[in-house]
């Protein structure tokens, strides 16, 4: 399953390769489906893309924030977890099947005329997503820490985001963690493209915990030296970080800067807990894109040490926030921030 617009870049070459291996489902944001917009390109991606990353091989599950593209395997900082669990694999397969009800199966004979399956299928998908949310939601009086191991030493909780169908489990998890934390709690949050939604910004403003946020420097941003307007995007993310720092007294901001490397790591760490997956914890993740992450709570000392080492390795290359941006970026930020 890939995004309708990103998957048809460069003439849809990737589709022709993937089709030999099995079914290819194309996800298209419902808004574009209703207005019958089908052309590949950046316009099609603005209002939302399929951004989930999970890779299943029998009972082995790889969770990551990385796409399977060549640029992700060369000097690009990301996170990958391999989890061997039939239960988790079955659960993701179940969700994958539900999500497939609101996609189009690519047909080489119909290439160039792909569209949403129709209003009836949208209604079915919306109902299915609602039932899924009710059956998997986190109880409001609990936090992810309270859902820790009761049998075994590690608990894995899949959390999804499908804004078009009012599924906001990742937002809910962050709200619960930040709003119930006390002053002794510390969080480290990482994002390749940090531009918090109003909901997350409110939680960061009012949390009692200390929150360290790691973001890429301009040079480590995936849009660095981008053509035309894309070249302004790193400045806009930098401006967003500066605004967040001004509004949130318990937040520290750090920038990852490593020679010739780009930064794409996403996640959260706190004591015996981590969240990892596709979400950048930004405006797009909250209101436009589909996302998948897992929260892991563990009492396993070896795993806890490994998570701490992972977090500390990211901090090794991180320094203070560079408080600079081009003035033209500030002019376009109020509009563009809704799409970053």
Image: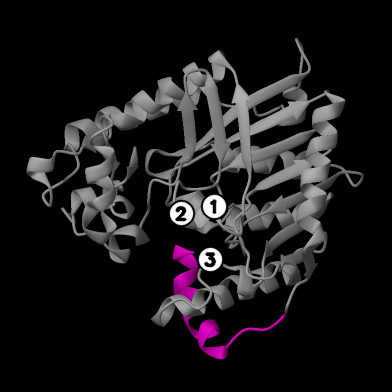
Numbered badge on residue 21: none
Can the viewer see residue 143? Answer: no
Query: Is there a contact, CB below 8 Å, between mark 3 and mark 1?
Result: no
Majority secondary structure in the magenta region: helix
**Residue found at x 80% / y 36%:** 306
The answer to whether residue 273 is above or below residue 114 is above
Please name the residue that numbered disc 1 is placed on: 73
Please name the residue that numbered disc 3 is placed on: 222
Query: Is there a contact, CB below 8 Å, between mark 2 and mark 1?
Result: yes
Q: Is residue 243 left or right of residue 307?
A: left
Farthest top residue in view: 151
Q: Which of pointers 3 and 1 indicates the residue nearer the eye?
A: 1
**Would you call the spot at circle 3 few (<14 residues within 10 Å), some (14-19), or many (20 or more)?**
many
**Residue found at x 21% / y 37%:** 104
The answer to whether residue 338 is above or below residue 125 is below
Q: Please state, as top left, top right, bottom left or bottom right, where the N terminus lies in the image.
A: top left
The numbered mark, 3 or 2, whose residue comes first in the sequence reads 2
Please name the residue that numbered disc 2 is placed on: 70
Kindly indicate the quadrant of the structure image that contains residue 268: top right
**Residue found at x 29% / y 54%:** 5
Distance CA(mark 2)–CA(mark 1): 6 Å
Residue 315, magenta (yes or no): no
**Would you call the spot at circle 1 few (<14 residues within 10 Å), some (14-19), or many (20 or more)?**
few
Range of magenta residues: 323-340
Q: Secondary structure at mark 2?
A: helix
The answer to whether residue 50 is above or below residue 104 is below
Image coordinates for residue 40, horizontal then vertical, percent:
24, 59
Q: Which of pointers 3 and 2 indicates the residue nearer the eye?
A: 2
Q: Is residue 235 left or right of residue 57?
A: right
């Amino acid at each position: 399953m890939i995004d309708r617009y990103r998957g048809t870049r460069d003439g849809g070459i990737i589709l022709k390769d993937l089709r030999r291996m099995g079914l290819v489902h194309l996800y298209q944001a419902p808004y574009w489906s209703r207005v019958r917009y089908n052309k590949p390109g950046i316009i099609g991606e603005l209002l939302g893309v399929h951004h989930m990353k999970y890779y299943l091989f029998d009972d082995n599950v790889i969770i990551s924030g990385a796409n399977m593209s060549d640029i992700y395997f060369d000097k690009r900082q990301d996170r990958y977890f391999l989890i061997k669990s039939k239960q988790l694999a079955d659960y993701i397969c179940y969700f994958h099947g539900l999500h497939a009800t609101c996609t189009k199966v690519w047909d080489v004979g119909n290439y160039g005329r792909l569209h949403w399956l129709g209003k009836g299928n949208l209604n079915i998908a919306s109902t299915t997503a609602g039932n899924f949310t009710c059956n998997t939601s986190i109880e409001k009086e609990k936090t992810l820490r309270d859902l820790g191991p009761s049998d075994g030493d590690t608990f894995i909780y899949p959390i999804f985001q499908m804004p078009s169908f009012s599924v906001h489990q990742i937002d809910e998890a962050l709200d619960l963690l930040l709003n119930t934390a006390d002053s002794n709690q510390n969080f480290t949050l990482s994002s390749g493209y940090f531009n918090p939604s109003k909901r997350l910004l409110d939680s960061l403003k009012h949390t009692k915990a200390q929150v360290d946020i790691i973001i890429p420097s301009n040079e480590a941003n995936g849009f660095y030296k981008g053509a035309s307007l894309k070249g302004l995007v790193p400045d806009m993310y930098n401006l967003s970080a500066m605004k967040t720092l001004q509004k949130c007294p318990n937040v520290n901001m750090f920038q990852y800067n490593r020679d010739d490397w780009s930064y794409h790591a996403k996640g959260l760490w706190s004591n015996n807990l981590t969240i990892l997956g596709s979400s950048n914890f930004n405006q797009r993740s909250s209101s436009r894109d589909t996302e998948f992450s897992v929260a892991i709570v563990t009492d396993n000392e070896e795993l806890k040490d490994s998570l701490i080492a992972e977090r500390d390795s990211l901090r090794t290359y991180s320094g203070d926030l560079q408080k600079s941006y081009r003035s033209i970026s500030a002019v376009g930020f109020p509009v563009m921030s809704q799409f970053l």
